[in-house]
Every structure is written in structure tokens, then in C-alpha cells.
Amino acid sequence: MGKSSKLKTKNILITGGAGFIGSHVVRLFVNSYSEHHIFNLDALTYAGNLENLTDIENKENYTFLKADITDADKINDLFAEYQFDAVIHLAAESHVDRSITDPLAFAKTNIMGTLNLLQAAKNTWKSKLHPSGGQGALFYHISTDEVYGTLGATGLFTEETNYDPNSPYSASKASSDHFVRAYGETYALPYVISNCSNNYGPNQFPEKLIPLFINNIIHKKNLPVYGDGNYTRDWLYVIDHAIAIKLLFEKGKLGETYNIGGFNEWKNIDLVKLLCRQMDKKLGREKGESEQLITFVNDRPGHDLRYAIDAGKINKELDWKPSVTFEEGLSKTIDWYLANEAWMQHVTSGTYQTYYRKQYTSEEGE
Ligand code: NAD
Ligand code: TYD
């Protein structure tokens, strides 16, 4: 394929836009593209929170659609009604630990949900799929570096690395990537896939390492480090991921995959110690106080040793690189959580599920 979609798009569907990464993508798109209409489709699971988007919810080019991607009829109806020109698909079950206890939920949402969207897109775009590469339509799948499995002490994941997923989460994401590619090969569906490393930043649900530990440090609760803490992840500030997604939406070559990473590897234990140091300063605590909360606990089964991304392709082709250092990004993230304790309180108590969901659904009076 090799050409970008040159979209003259009108209706852009973003799935999972009430979640962590999706909310930053929705905000960026709504504020950047007054000529396009942005539809945010989300089932509002425990991870979806419309409180993440209160600043843009009244914009004229924004509509929220409450729907579950596993409901094929509903998805088909919405495509028929709104004739989406492009899909940016982020909706997913996203936490490895949950996938270990409930793998079927991950297969249902991440594989079957993606297939429902692919089918609806294929059927809607049938008449306008262009033999030389789908002018005017794009299915952009947001995926993870975890599909590549684990690295040893050296090496980097490139776009050519074989898929070798180890957790039910990564297996479900790998499967959905394969289906997207298969729809490209079989039905000429114009697509782009990006595989990104671990994100961090505002609005991340406190089950993932960084927000969980920020919350625990605030409340002087134990910091449960899995195993010996010598596992390595490559961390990217979420807004830099959103910027990369916008670039690939505009200029990504159809039928291609792009790795996105932070050029920023940290062993978990070193990251946790940095977090403790930064938080002690901000909270006016004694140096070393929060480190005493570190508790080594049983390891995660099938725990991948190391992820690290070679983001050279997007860097060379589209001149993208992270805009903040890890120390800056982490500091901004801590500041956000300290300034938004009510958000944390709502998501941990589930308040938003009863308050914000009510405004959009027939769940009134639940
Ligand atoms: P998240 O868990 O914060 O948000 C997921 C969103 O999807 C929520 O708003 C949720 O309500 C919605 N959703 C879940 N199931 C749904 C369903 N059946 N129908 C409709 N909506 C549903 O996830 P995130 O961390 O923002 O990740 C977003 C995407 O990016 C995922 O596809 C994930 O695999 C990918 N990704 C995440 C990371 C990361 O570090 N968080 C890194 C690389 C890729
Ligand atoms: P996580 O944020 O769950 O992301 P992922 O599993 O997708 O990489 O975990 C990041 C790393 O931190 C991973 O190596 C597991 C580890 N971890 C802990 O040590 N303790 C925790 O409580 C959590 C949630 C994660």
C-alpha cells in the first residue's frame, strides 16, 4: 500500500474515549479539528469516566455515544446512522492483572469487539473502498508493545519483531491486531496500527503501577512491588502518545505498523524510588519516608521481564519524539493527582458511575 489516507474526513469515531489514553486523544482531536465531528463511543466500564472530558463536553463538534463494542447490532446501527469516515479504536480491557483473573472478558471485548467494529466499517465503506488504498476512510487500531512478548537484558522491539504474547491481555491485543491486518489484506480495508509502550499521566485508573503507587503514597499505604522489582518498562507521557496518534491519523502509511515509545527504560524498583523521592519533596515529608512503604510481594504469573521500543520509524518518518523528560512528566503527573484528589476519590468509590453515566443513558433512576 504505502500511501497515507489523505482523509477529507467529516465524522471521526473514537472508541474508548472516556478512558485514560482515549480521553486525551478525544480532547486533542476535538480542539484541533473544528471542521470534523468527533464521536466518542464508550461503554463506561469501571475504567471509563466522563469526568475526564468535562472541559470539552459542550463543544459543537463533540458527541458522546454510550455503547458496548461487543453489541454488534448496536455498532451496526451507529455506523448506519452516522456513516463514520474514520475509526480510531482504543476501547479495550487494558489491565494485565485483570486478564489473569478473567481472560474471557478480554477475548470478548478486545477480540470480538474489534471484529464487530471491523465488520461495521467494512460494510459501511464497501462502496467507497478505493482499489489503490481507500481514499477517505481509515481504521486506526491502537495497540501495545506487549504483543511482542518479552525481551531479555538487551535488544529493542521493532516493527519487524515477531508477535509472541505471554499474558491473556497481550494475546487478545495480538489477536485484534491480526484481525485488523487480515481485513486489510482480504477486504482492502485501509488501516494503520500503532504499538505503544507503557503510558503514564493524568486520568489513569489507579490499578496501574504509577497512579496506584501515587495514591498509596498519599495515604501512606504499602507499595506492592511484584517479585524482585527488576522488571523493566519503557514509559511514555500520555499526551505525547496522543500527539503521535494524531500524526499517524494524518500521515501514517496505510497498511503499516508504527512502534511508539518513550526512549525511556526504567526498572520498576528504580522508578518507584524516584516516585517516592519526588512525592516526599512535594508532600513536605522527610527524605526516604515513602521508600519505607515499599513491600516486595508475590510475582505476577507470566511476568514479562522487559519491554523496550525502537521508535525510530515514527521518529524518522514523522519527526515525532517525546516532548517531556520522564522526571518532568512524572512531576506533572504527581501534581495532577495531588490537585485532583476528588477524581481519585470518585473513581475508587465508583461515584462517577452513578453521577456521570446518568446524564447520557436510560440508566436514570438506577
Ligand atoms: P483504559 O482501561 O483506561 O480505558 C479503556 C476504555 O475503553 C474505557 O473508557 C472503557 O469504558 C472502554 N471500554 C472497555 N470495554 C468496552 C466495551 N466493551 N465497549 C466500549 N467501550 C469499552 O485503557 P487505556 O490505558 O486508556 O488504553 C486504551 C487503549 O490503548 C487500549 O486499547 C490499550 O490496549 C492501548 N494501550 C494502552 C497502553 C497503556 O499503557 N495504558 C499502552 C499501549 C496501548
Ligand atoms: P502495569 O502498570 O500493570 O502495566 P503493564 O503490566 O502493562 O506493564 O505494571 C507495570 C509494571 O509494574 C509491571 O512490571 C508490573 C509492575 N507492578 C508492580 O510491581 N506492582 C503493582 O502493584 C502493579 C500494578 C504493577
Image: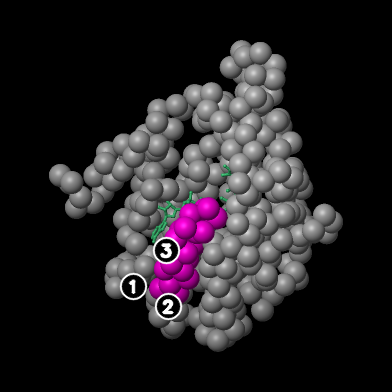
| Callout 2: CB less than 8 Å from ligand 1 | no
Residue 31 screen position, x and y as percent:
49, 44
Residue under numbered circle 2: 119
Residue 313 screen position, x and y as percent:
76, 61
Q: Quadrant of residue 168?
A: bottom right
Q: Is residue 163 left or right of residue 181?
A: right
Q: Residue furthest right?
A: 154
Residue at image location 64% in from the left, 38% down from the top:
296
Chain-order first, disc 3 or disc 1: 1
Q: What's the residue type where badge 3 is placed?
A: Ala
Residue at image location 71% in from the left, 48% down from the top:
231
- Above or below residue 31? Residue 167 is below
Residue at image location 76% in from the left, 60% down from the top:
151
Quarter holding the N terminus is: bottom right
- Above or below residue 71? Residue 228 is above
- Above or below residue 221? Residue 310 is below
Spatial CA distance of label 3 from label 1 is 16 Å
Residue 111 screen position, x and y as percent:
47, 70
Q: Is residue 271 left or right of residue 176?
A: right
Is 108 included in the stretch rendered in magenta? yes
Q: Nearer the viewer, mark 3 or mark 1?
A: 3
Is 213 included in the stretch rendered in magenta? no
Chain-order first, disc 3 or disc 2: 3
Spatial CA distance of label 2 from label 1 is 9 Å
Mark on residue 72? 1
- Above or below residue 251? Residue 276 is above
Is the residue under label 1 in contact with that under label 2 (CB below 8 Å)? yes
The one of 315 and 145 positioned closer to us in this rendering = 145
Q: What's the residue type where badge 2 is placed?
A: Gln
